[in-house]
Image: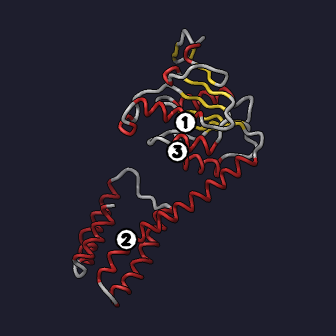
Amino acid sequence: MYFLFIPYFLFLAFPLYSLAYFALIHTPILYFWNKGIDKKLVFTSKVKWFFVFVFVYNAIFAILALRFSFLFNLFSLPFALLSLKIYEFFTNLYYKKQAKAKLRANENLKIILITASFGKTSIKNFLYELLKDDFKSYKTPRSVNTLLGIVADINTNLSQDTQIYIAEAGARLKGDIDEITRFLQPHISIVGEIGNAHLEYFKSVENIRSTKLEALNSKRLKKAFLHSSTQKEEDKLISLYDDKLSLIHSSLEGLEFK
């Protein structure tokens, strides 16, 4: 936001000199900064809408400032940010409804949700390799593990003849996985090893554990496979998978276990 707020407040403080600053200092800095980074600036739909809002509110409040008070110029950026938040809210709501309808339309689709402190992407990829030859299977690409990422993936990539959809769920806050679980309503949940990854967000391993176990909140849950670090007891719904494995060995030739 440096390249937005600095020129904005300089304009408010020194309107007569802001154009010279922007042309002689700010623009060259922005150019060389963009040239030096590996990943170039991408003007996403969100960024484009933000600049539209800034332009519109600048025009509106500039007119009001000329007629009433210069202080009206202070409102353009806050109003643009507020409008962007409102735009995001309704856009995300629309895409969620679209993805939910797509899932609902596929009556034969079974959903598997995977979460863990470590290795959830590896579990997802391994499970996909096991299932893909027998079922029309699809997994979320790379490390897509947020609600909005999953929603976008469903709307864009999930075909209507898919039989098994494998998704992974990540979290930065308590409730993140619950949100994904209640959206997908998975039939099977897998909770891998719980550890201190992302401890800076959750403050304690117990908070991490309770957040990961939100993957069990599905109303359609038929079976859950959990690592013993979840500290859950086995029952008709829950199986602890690591206690049943022995002689685990991995090499370049593959993985062996009993």
In the rendering, at what x and y percent does residue 151 appear? 60, 49
Q: Quadrant of residue 12?
A: bottom left
Camera-side residue of 219 and 157: 219
Mark 3 and mark 2 lie on one chain; the one further toward the N terminus is: 2
Disc marking residue 146: 3
Q: Badge 3, how many Cα within 10 Å: few under 14, some, many 20+?
A: some
Numbered disc 1: secondary structure: helix
Marks 1, 2: nearer the viewer: 1
Residue at figure coordinates x 72%, y 29% from the top left: 133
Secondary structure at numbered mark 3: loop
Residue 212: percent from left, percent from top: 51, 33
Image coords of residue 45 (percent x, y): 51, 63
Give whichever of discs 3 and 1 has the lower sequence position. 3
Q: Residue 208 occupies which quadrant of the picture?
A: top left
Q: CA distance from mark 3 to mark 2?
A: 29 Å
Q: Position of residue 173 (x, y in %)?
A: 44, 42
Q: Is residue 113 left or right of residue 70?
A: right
Is residue 254 in sight in this rendering? no
The N terminus, quarter of image: bottom left
Q: Is residue 192 above or below residue 72?
A: above
> Which residue is identified by label 2?
77
Pick the residue in front: 14 or 196: 196
| Residue 228 in sight in this render | yes
Which residue lies at the image location 34% right of the left edge and 57% below the top edge?
Answer: 35
Circle 1 residue = 214
Name which residue type carries label 2. Answer: Leu
Q: What residue sits 64% from the left and 34% below the top?
A: 112
